[in-house]
């Protein structure tokens, strides 16, 4: 399976994943965390198995099969996830 990955324009930590056969599902209400927000295509990526760090592929596949997409927040892009180097911890 090739995963089509999209990032929310407003909430940069929010991603939506689908496949070629379910791209129309991205037009459904409730896909984006903010109604009417734009999703920007990040790219198309093949399966990586357990090496994929951003999301669980098996869970994503089940979600895509049942509702047409998989949504998640990426912790790696969270600007408050770690204390900045210039700030006391």
Image: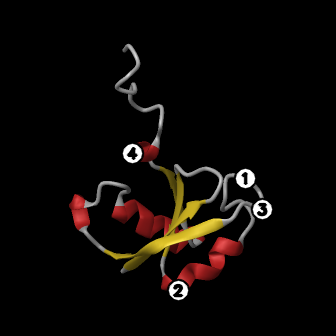
Q: In the rendered image, which quarter is residue 9 located in?
A: bottom right
Report the front residue among 64 and 6.
Answer: 6
Q: CA distance from mark 3 to mark 1?
A: 6 Å
Report x, y in % for residue 88. Answer: 38, 13
- Is the C terminus in the top left, top right, bottom left or bottom right quadrant? top left
- Is the N terminus in the top left, top right, bottom left or bottom right quadrant? bottom left
For marks 4 and 2, the one nearer the N-term is: 2
Tell me which residue sits at (29%, 73%) in the image.
Answer: 47
Query: From the viewer's perspective, is the residue at label 3 or at label 2 nearer?
Result: 3
What residue does disc 1 label? 34
25 lies left or right of 58: right
Report x, y in % for residue 34. Answer: 72, 53
- Check if mark 2's residue and mark 1's residue have beta carbons within 8 Å: no
For marks 3 and 2, the one nearer the N-term is: 2
What residue does disc 2 label? 21
Number of residues whose C-alpha sits closer than 10 Å to that of mark 1, classed few (under 14), some (14–19) or many (20 or more): few
Q: In the rendered image, which quarter is residue 25 located in?
A: bottom right
What residue does disc 3 label? 36
- Check if mark 3's residue and mark 2's residue have beta carbons within 8 Å: no
Above or below, comparing residue 56 to residue 77 in the picture: below
- Check if mark 3's residue and mark 1's residue have beta carbons within 8 Å: yes
- Check if mark 4's residue and mark 2's residue have beta carbons within 8 Å: no
Q: Secondary structure at mark 2?
A: helix
Report the front residue among 59 and 23.
Answer: 23
Above or below, comparing residue 86 to residue 28 in the picture: above
Q: CA distance from mark 4 to mark 2?
A: 28 Å
Which disc is residue 76 wearing?
4
């Amino acid at each position: 399976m090739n995963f089509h990955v999209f990032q929310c324009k407003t909430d940069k930590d929010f991603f939506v994943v689908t496949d070629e056969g379910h791209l129309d599902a991205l037009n459904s209400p409730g896909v984006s965390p903010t109604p009417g927000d734009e999703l920007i295509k990040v790219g198309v990526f093949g399966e990586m198995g357990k090496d994929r760090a951003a999301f669980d592929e098996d869970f994503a596949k089940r979600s895509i099969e049942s509702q047409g997409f998989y949504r998640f927040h990426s912790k790696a892009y969270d600007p408050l996830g770690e204390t900045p180097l210039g700030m006391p911890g």
